[in-house]
Amino acid sequence: MTALTRTPDNTNFLQPSKFILTFGRIPTVQYFCQEANLPGVALGSTKFDTPLLDIPIAGNKLTYNQLQVNFIVDESIQSWTELYNWLRAFGSPKSLSDRSNQSILQTGGNAPLNNYSEATLTVMSALNNPLFRVNYHKLFPTSLSDIQFDVKNSADTIITATASFAYEYFEITRA
């Protein structure tokens, strides 16, 4: 944008269907991904009390919203099962021996790094060229939705599921 024209250099609109989401850990979910979000961020604040006015002061901690992913459930439910097994690695419903990595117990309850994953959301231009990448660090699933069967639906209805992910932080890099 120049000071004289106030016109942006790029007047193309961001398109909601031009993205690729890649995971280091769950390739089937990556293949069947239908929706993903660029999570919002909030900065906490506090107030400085004065006799006349409470003055807001910027905080020093960012709070990231969760990454939400909607994906198609394949016939063998492999996409759903990949996430289910990853969740079980953190919180075993039966016994401690169900956990995929016993080092969870040896790190004082903190999950080891191999239970996390990296993920990248690549956003594309109208010409399918990468515009920017959102790199999520130390990502892990926090929830996985139900699979709903319904005899009232036709056989052509596609079953989808939703997963939520927490992560340490994300970085945006231009392509």
Image (tube, rainbow, N blue to C red):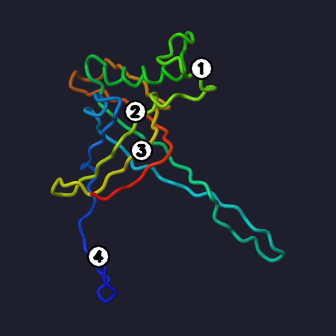
Disc 3, disc 2: CB below 8 Å? Answer: no
Q: Which of marks 1 and 3 is in front?
A: 1
Horizontal side of 25 relative to 52 (left or right) equals left
Q: Where is residue 110 in the image (x, y as percent from the top left)?
A: 58, 29
State the separation of the CA atoms marked 3 and 4. Answer: 29 Å
Q: Is residue 93 above or below residue 145?
A: above
**Tag shown at residue 136:** 3
Indicate which disc, 4 or 1, sits on the residue closer to the N terminus.
Answer: 4
Asked whether, in this view, residue 6 is left or right of residue 170, the answer is left
Q: Which of marks 4 and 1 is in front?
A: 1
- Name which residue lies at 50% across and 47% down: 65
Report the residue at 48% width, 43% height from top: 66
Separation of residues labelled 1 and 2 (CA atoms): 29 Å
Residue indicated by mark 2: 162
Distance of mark 4 from mark 1, alpha carbons?
54 Å
Quadrant position of residue 117: top left
